[in-house]
Image (spheres, helix red, strand yellow):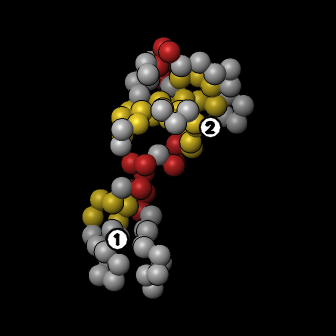
């Protein structure tokens, strides 16, 4: 999917229409602006859906540290910490 092939009446392609889709996990994510809600989102193909920019999968990728109890990373982007279900630190 090229950004110039995207059209939806409620959205504009990011960067003034020049945004290039990001590939992640076999899917393409195009950064778009929702003109109705005034929020950035991603259009995901081949799923044909919109997700909030904070729900992009790379926003939840661990960057350092491991929990001794559940093995999940302590330090994530933006300082959020996530643990596996059942971990006492969750």
Dot 1 or dot 2, earlier in sequence:
2
Q: Out of 26 and 87, give the one closest to the viewer.
A: 26
Which element is circle 1 on?
loop
Is 26 drawn above or below residue 78 in the view shown? above
Q: Is residue 40 visible?
A: no
- The number of numbered discs placed on residues in the rendered structure image is 2
Q: Give the labeled residue for mark 1.
A: 72
Give coordinates of residue 47: x percent, y percent: 52, 36
Q: Which mark is residue 46?
A: none
Q: Out of 53 and 51, give the one closest to the viewer.
A: 51
Is 7 drawn above or below residue 34 in the view shown? above
Is 7 drawn above or below residue 32 in the view shown? above
In this rendering, would 2 be left or right of 39?
left
In this rendering, would 10 be left or right of 86?
right
In this rendering, would 9 be left or right of 67?
right
Q: Give the labeled residue for mark 2.
A: 39
The residue mark sitting in front, 1 or 2, is 1
Give coordinates of residue 35: x percent, y percent: 67, 28
- Quarter of the N terminus within the rendering: top left
Q: Out of 77 and 27, give the one closest to the viewer.
A: 27
Which element is circle 2 on?
strand
| The quadrant where residue 52 appears | top right
Q: Is residue 67 visible?
A: yes
């Amino acid at each position: 999917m090229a950004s110039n092939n995207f059209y939806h009446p409620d959205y504009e392609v990011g960067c003034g229409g020049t945004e290039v889709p990001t590939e992640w996990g076999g899917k393409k994510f195009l950064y778009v602006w929702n003109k109705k809600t005034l929020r950035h989102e991603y259009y995901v193909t081949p799923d044909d859906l919109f997700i909030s920019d904070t729900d992009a999968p790379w926003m939840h990728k661990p960057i350092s540290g491991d929990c001794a109890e559940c093995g999940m990373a302590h330090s994530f982007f933006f300082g959020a910490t996530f643990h596996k279900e059942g971990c006492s630190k969750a």
